[in-house]
Image (cartoon, rainbow, N blue to C red):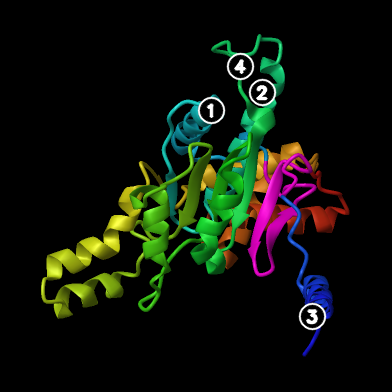
Amino acid sequence: MIDDNILMSQLDRIAAALERLAPAAPAPPDFDAAEAFVWHADPEGFQAVPAVNRVPLTLLKGISRAADQLIDNTERFARGLPANNALLWGARGMGKSSLVKAAHAFIGAAAVQSRVHPPGSPQEIRMGQLKLIEIHREDIASLPRCLGHVRASRHRFIVFCDDLSFDRDDTSYKSLKAVLEGGIEGRPENVIFYATSNRRHLMPRDMVDNERSTAINPSEAVEEKVSLSDRFGLWLGFHNGSQDDYLDMVRGYAAYHGLGMAQDQLDREALEWSMTRGGRSGRVAWQFIQDLAGRLGAKLKTE
């Protein structure tokens, strides 16, 4: 028979060896390391973003009403007041994702100015604790795990998904619905969710039509598909810009980056550029400015 002491010693050695082989527990996220992060589902963690790629709010033209609404909503959230999840939907290239990042920066600048006010005053903005987290569309099913990391944090978080949409066989939208409003835990008090999409209901039209034509109860099937957008209390629509909006964008970019060119020539070249691109969006305006800066041998500012 094996002596009990020898057996226990062997078991202890085996247990110690298994502990060494097991992966180390991930370190808790350090949300003080940066103002923005990217969530990765595999391996799980938050990647700090040292410099956010964004455009100053003043350079976003033709979307002033949407900008005012999102700024107001974000400021209320930063102050710890009730605020809504926001869906920014509509035309491509009109500044939906740029507005989310610009709103975060704008509230940050306001917070710096508000620090002269005493803590707890109506003017105080807790922007020092407001972080921006981007989650990629393909990782949306891992959103509950992401929120699990931030739920107990002293910080407040804008969780942002760019170009959010769902295809015919994609069921991850059900998880998102539960996280936003319907689950037992629901959305943490210190989190707000902003998403951009080209689709108002986040589902392709043929998907909704197919559900209506094939389901036993068509109305219930359609409700299941389109009710996801109802989880967003704030809908902000973006529409194709006019020629005047487009030229305002170009002029604003040119002035901000110090690109010296007579306005009539700038306008003429910008309109020619838009005709080759088949559109007059903010994205087209920025692409023209990059081309112009390259031709002029000028450097563009970075925030």
Q: Is residue 222 left or right of residue 155?
A: left
Question: x, y percentage for residue 227?
Answer: 28, 56
3 or 2: mark nearer the eye? 3
Q: Residue at x 28, y 65 (%)?
A: 225
Say which element carries label 3: helix
Quadrant position of residue 146: bottom right
Mark 4 vs 2, N-terminal side = 2
Q: Nearer the viewer, mark 3 or mark 4?
A: 3
Residue under label 2, please give it.
111
- Regarding residue 87, the answer to whether it shows in the image is yes
Mark found first going from the N terminus, 1 or 3: 3
Single out the mark in the foreground, 4 or 1: 4
Residue drawn at (80%, 73%) of the image: 12
Which residue is pictured at 54% across the width and 24% down the height? 79
- Residue 269 visible here: no
Left/right placement of residue 214 relative to residue 80 reads left
Percent across and percent down for residue 190 are 53, 37
Q: Residues within 10 Å of mark 4 (few under 14, many from 20)?
A: some
**Which of labels 1 and 3 is toward the front?**
3
Per the image, the residue denoted by label 3 is 7
**C-alpha span from label 1 to label 2:** 10 Å
Above or below, comparing residue 184 to residue 20 in the picture: above
Amino acid type, mark 3: Leu
Q: Which residue is mark 1?
A: 75
Q: Return the residue nearer the eye: 48 or 28.
A: 28
